[in-house]
Image (cartoon, helix red, strand yellow):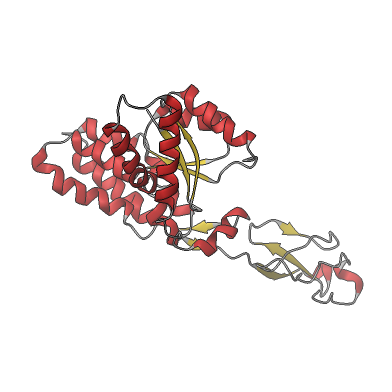
Amino acid sequence: MWTAIHCLTGECEAITEKGESSQSWRELLLDLKRRGLSKAPDLAIGDGALGFWNALREVFGTTREQRCWVHKTGNVLNAMPKSLQAKAKGHLQDIWMAETKEDAEAAFDFFVEAYGVKYDRAVEKLTKDREVLLTFYDFPAEHWKHIRTSNPIESTFATVRHRTKKTKGCLGRKTALAMTFRLMMSAKKKWRKLDGAFRLPEIIEGVEFKDGIKQEKTCRLITASPTFGHSSFYRHYSDQVYRPGWGRRCHYPDDRRLYPGGDRRPFGSGRFPQIG
């Protein structure tokens, strides 16, 4: 059994010949950490293999999870009669093709209500991963086609499976690993850049996305009560109050300029603070 981890920046980060048990994945992830992956990835995409997810939670506990919709669709449809599969597949597509998470939740509820009574096993396969099937809505819309499924690594690894099957029994461990590595490096030459690659720095910086749209930080000016005369205080987009005299700072979206109040002067000083 060959296992690989593919990074959406266009690199194959790790290859191992071990299986997909929790221990095998743990060793692979710890090796990545040892080689410099000190910061936990923001998102991991994969099928429902428990070994990977158990190991990921142990090694990189803050990494968010996204289940593969291609694998999930196949698992759900396999638990339904063939005569209904085409129709059910369309209703599943209504979920992950929805423009917003709210619409996806509504389509999800419809599927549960429409098929839950007669095909409870199929619906259970879907609902058990409900939250992690919709994680992609918190990332840029340009990336959705890449992160809804694990197909980027599946299609790349298909050529490796083809070659290893044809040469089964003819290779030792080291030669098989070397061949797999060279095949992956050859396949890498045909990889194209991720759509919306310019969004990656924003993901790294922790910029918030909702329904695929970047959420800008804003500040609201609120006039104080007569007790403070003509002074004012500011409230951040998260509704945390910035009271007079506290000297708290509230930034523009690009974090380069300060709103009034950033000079740490009490607002009742008789002079309205200037924008820095």
Q: Residue 18: tell me if it is visible.
A: no
Between 54 and 9, which is closer to the camera in this rendering?
A: 9
Between 84 and 176, the one lying in front of the other is 176
Determine the image quadrant of residue 115. top left
Camera sees residue 170: yes
Residue at x-position 79% and y-position 76%: 275
- Residue 19 x, y percent position in the rendering: 41, 25
- For the N terminus, the quadrant is top left
Quarter of the image for the C terminus: give it. Answer: bottom right
Observer-nearest of 229 and 175: 175
Q: Is residue 19 left or right of residue 63?
A: left
Q: Is residue 33 left or right of residue 165?
A: right
Identify which residue, 120 or 11, lies in the foreground.
Answer: 11
Q: Name the side, left or right, on which 233 lies relative to 154.
A: right
Residue under the point 84% across and 76% down: 272
What is the residue that sits farthest to the right in this orientation?
269
Say whether residue 10 is left or right of residue 149. Answer: right
